[in-house]
Amino acid sequence: MPGARRGPNDTLPTLPRLESTYSRIIERAIQAVREERGLAGKLRGVTRQMAALGGHTRQQFRELPPAKRAGVSLGLLVVGAALALVAYHLLFRASPDELRRAIAADIAASRFVAAKHTLDELSARTGGLSPDDRWKLAAPIQAWTDKRASELLEIIEARRRTKRWDDALAALLELEQLGVEIELALFTHAEVLRAAGRREEAAEYYARYARIFPATHESDDALFWQALMHKELGEDARSRVVLRELLEKYPRSNFATSGKRLLGELNSAE
């Protein structure tokens, strides 16, 4: 209304409209910011839409051919930036005490993932957690995180044994979102994708693992399996590049002999 008083939520940045589900996710996030009461409620609204974004994007990637995935990735970057902007707008305005109240409210309602994100913001804002924050806020979040991670690891192994690949992958994604057991989660994710016959995604996860963890026992394994996935996908040039990297970085690897043999096969087929 002309002349109406503007509330604090009316200062949210104007975001570009996007088509399809992505635009609805942004709109719902902004609606939650404007309609939910209290910082905790507003952050929950944004968190729900971030979860929706992740679920929708995973489904999109499964259904789209590789050639169209770049477009989805671009859409994901735009929407992720928009949601991050909304969350930043909220957190930037919140005082440390408001953040503490939001964390406590989320802990009381067993919304530990949201509480963990806000706790990270509190720590960054205050230059570190106080002893009181560590005792009252961080300790219960860490206890829940450790318990949930242990449960997820059991679920993943059970689903792998019964070849329920989609259920195993869902549990792996949740484990990665917790931010614990990242090394194990990444390599296992690649292994499950390979077992499920999803070679392109498996190659991406193996590459990601080798890049992030170049000095572990599985680093050379990851490069070999990445190269093999590329070969099975008909991407011989990419396979050769990865195999040369394997042999250069890990000449004493258990996979060195297999890598040389595979590289020889690829070179002879040129």
Image (cartoon, rainbow, N blue to C red):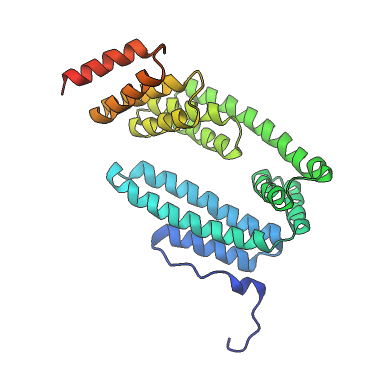
Vertical relation: 100 (above or below) 4:
above
Q: Describe residue 97's horizontal placement relative to residue 196 as left or right.
A: right
Residue under the image location 77 percent in, 38 percent down: 139
Relative height, residue 48 to residue 143 (above, below): below
Toward the right, the furthest residue is: 132
Left or right: 147 with respect to 202? right
Residue nearer the viewer, 183 or 129: 129
Q: Quadrant of residue 92?
A: bottom right
Left or right? Give the position of 216 relative to 19.
Answer: right
Quarter of image, res 194:
top left
Q: Position of residue 216 (x, y in %)?
A: 51, 21
Query: Residue 78: x, y in percent?
Result: 44, 57
Residue under the point 27% across and 45% down:
67
Residue appearing at x 65%, y 33% in the figure:
148
Question: For this rendering, which residue is in front, 219 or 171?
Answer: 219
The vertical placement of 239 against 113, above or below, is above
Residue lying furthest front in this view?
248
The quarter of the rendered structure image containing the C terminus is: top left
Q: Quadrant of the N terminus?
A: bottom right
Residue in the picture at 28% in, 30% down:
238
The front one of 198 and 253 is 253
Residue 19 percent location from the top left of the image: 38, 63
Would you identify the image quadrant in which residue 239 lies? top left
